[in-house]
Image (cartoon, rainbow, N blue to C red):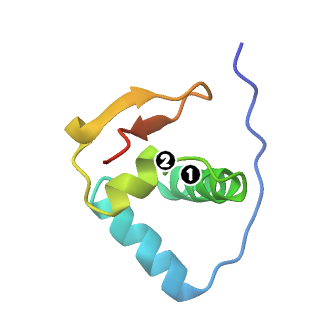
């Protein structure tokens, strides 16, 4: 059973909001909430030195077809290069 999401309020720098909206326009994120949640998840992965997440790869222009498998935590992972 999925956990219920908690609603919060945040204040962001206008430059970050502009970037977030551009990522939504590029279909990296579905909406602002999705973008903020994904960015926090990416930061969490980075803290533990995990492979780049699906969203980080899409933001870098990696084609979805290059994402080869789903990690044990449910995030999409890219094949290791080399």
Q: Which residue is mark 2?
A: 53
Residue 4 against residue 45 in the figure, above or below: above
Element class at badge 1: helix
Residue 40 against residue 2 in the figure, above or below: below
Q: Is residue 76 left or right of residue 58?
A: right
**Front-most of residues 13 and 53:** 53
Residue 77 against residue 8 in the figure, above or below: above
Q: Position of residue 2 (x, y in %)?
A: 70, 20
Q: Is residue 40 left or right of residue 18?
A: right
Q: Residue at the spot x=43%, y=76% of the render?
A: 19
Q: Is residue 26 left or right of residue 69?
A: left
Estimate the spatial distance between the alpha carbons at disc 2 and disc 1, rounded to whole Å: 9 Å
Element class at badge 2: loop
Considering only order in the chain, which callout, 1 or 2, is on the residue closer to the N terminus?
A: 1
Q: Is residue 71 visible?
A: yes
Q: Is residue 81 left or right of residue 11?
A: left
Q: Position of residue 5 (x, y in %)?
A: 73, 37
Report the disc number at residue 38: 1
Label 1 packing within 10 angstroms: few (<14), some (14-19), many (20+)? some
Give the residue furthest to the top: 1
Label 2 packing within 10 angstroms: few (<14), some (14-19), many (20+)? many
Nearer the viewer's eye, disc 2 or disc 1? 2
Instruction: Say how many tags the image has.
Output: 2
> Are dots 2 and 1 in contact, CB under 8 Å?
yes
**Front-most of residues 13 and 54:** 54
Query: Dividing the image into 4 quarters, which one contains the N terminus?
Result: top right
Q: Residue at the spot x=49%, y=47% of the render?
A: 53
Q: Residue at the spot x=71%, y=76% of the render?
A: 11
Q: Residue at the spot x=53%, y=79% of the render?
A: 16
**Front-most of residues 31 and 39:** 39
Q: Position of residue 52 (x, y in %)?
A: 49, 51
Q: Position of residue 21 (x, y in %)?
A: 40, 69
């Amino acid at each position: 059973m999925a956990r219920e999401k908690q609603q919060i309020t945040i204040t962001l720098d206008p430059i970050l909001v502009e970037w977030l909206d551009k990522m939504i326009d590029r279909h990296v994120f579905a909406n602002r909430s999705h973008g903020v949640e994904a960015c926090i998840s990416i930061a969490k992965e980075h803290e533990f030195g995990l492979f780049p997440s699906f969203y980080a790869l899409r933001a870098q222009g990696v084609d979805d077809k290059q994402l080869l498998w789903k990690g044990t935590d449910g995030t999409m992972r890219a094949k290791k290069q080399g």
